[in-house]
Amino acid sequence: MRKMADPYVLAWISVFVTTLLALCGVVSKRRKVNGISSSRTMSVTSVSAVDGECRSADGCDTDVIIVGAGVAGSALAHTLGKDGRRVHVIERDLSEPDRIVGELLQPGGYLKLIELGLEDCVEEIDAQQVFGYALFKDGKRTRLSYPLENFHSDVSGRSFHNGRFIQRMREKAASLPNVRLEQGVVTSLLEEKGTIRGVQYKTKDGRELTAFAPLTIVCDGCFSNLRRSLCNPQVDVPSCFVGLVLENCCLPYANHGHVILADPSPILFYPISSTEIRCLVDVPGQKVPSIANGEMANNLKTVVAPQVPPEIYDSFVAAVDKGNIRTMPNRSMPASPYPTPGALLMGDAFNMRHPLTGGGMTVALSDIVVLRDLLKPLRDLNDAPTLSCGIYNQYIGRCIVQSVLRIT
């Protein structure tokens, strides 16, 4: 069973390599992308222009529609809004998310926050600085620090409650007068002669509306119902996470993520506030023990607990006894887009790596920097040929930190 740990060691080494490359600002790597498939018609509705022009039902002029206001969508809305674009964000639920992933931002991601003017979004949410990882295996332990010697003392990883971070970015985006956040469910993309013109969506009060813009960016996350229109998704679910929160305890190495290379797979610990430690137990496969009949609690106490560091054993067992145990499938999906005029995929809707790598948010923020720089020279997004070229370049000119880290 223990032979499974070796790929995870390689995966964590890859995390440090990609973090170093992000810190050094290495950018390159081109990918070939697939042509448009005839099977991509799901979630696409044909639309005709009126007097040669498509306009939203509310009569507002919009430069960019963003579907989804998670980490990618919120950061993108603020970035494009700050550049003077008129942005309409449609998010299915604007209440604070409650997730067990998306809680640790690597130093390269924090540098992208600074570059985007969003670094204050990790303030006032009790975020914790992270300076590296501690690795544990067979009773031995070692500490690996991020290579931050040449950076300001404020540059480090950050860990936090995912929902608090997202709400801060939503608030910052909504503070711009040319950014509009609306709660609604996008049901389809609107297409005219092969070009995406906007979206059809249902508002919070049940009205069916349309919205039009020269560019629609789909950032509706790992459960995206629109991605099949814009890419060839090949989603793999290699494992599931079992999540717990340990309270009022200290990790063996302060301000570090902890990776226990356990049998049969890793266990993660990292702070998400000054009083809370997130624990994620990786369970191979797509099935987990039942929480309802007590099988999960028994497994955590008898199989997992003996392998956690002794300093946090009691807190781990107490968290299990408290009963707030959550699970989620871990997904990975390589990027395989259909370059489509008028539309673009970003974030987890486009490309996912296993959450064990801790690179998802850094990838999304890096993509936003690339897209911002590609769009800046375009004064008029209605210039379809130039915009299409920009979309194509976004797909093939992505940073090396956006490579998918596969765990096999």
Image (cartoon, rainbow, N blue to C red):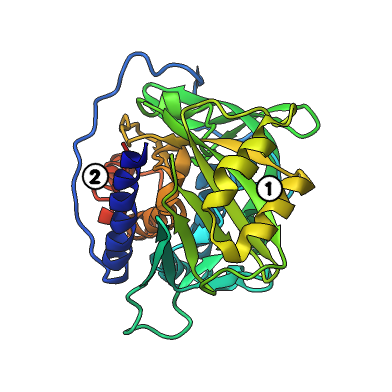
| Residue 83 in view (yes/no) | no
Residue 29: give x, y in percent of width and height.
19, 51
The secondary structure type at the circle numbered 1 is: loop
Label 2 sits on residue: 396
Residue 362: give x, y in percent of width and height.
42, 58
Tell me the tag on residue 313.
Answer: none
- Residue 335: name its quadrant: top left
Dot 2 or dot 1, earlier in sequence: 1
Residue 241: give x, y in percent of width and height.
54, 40
Label 1 sits on residue: 97
- In the depicted view, which residue is nearer to us: 334 or 369? 334
Tell me: residue 373, above or below residue 99: below
- In the depicted view, which residue is nearer to us: 279 or 192? 279
The amino acid on which the numbered mark 1 sits, given as a three-letter code, is: Pro
Question: Mark 1 packing: few (<14 Cα in 10 Å), some, or many (20+)?
Answer: some
Tell me: residue 225, above or below residue 393: above
**Distance of mark 2 from mark 1, alpha carbons?**
32 Å
Q: Quadrant of the C terminus?
A: top left
Residue under the point 45% across and 57% down: 259
The amino acid on which the numbered mark 2 sits, given as a three-letter code, is: Ile
* Between marks 2 and 1 in the image, the one whose residue lies nearer the viewer: 1
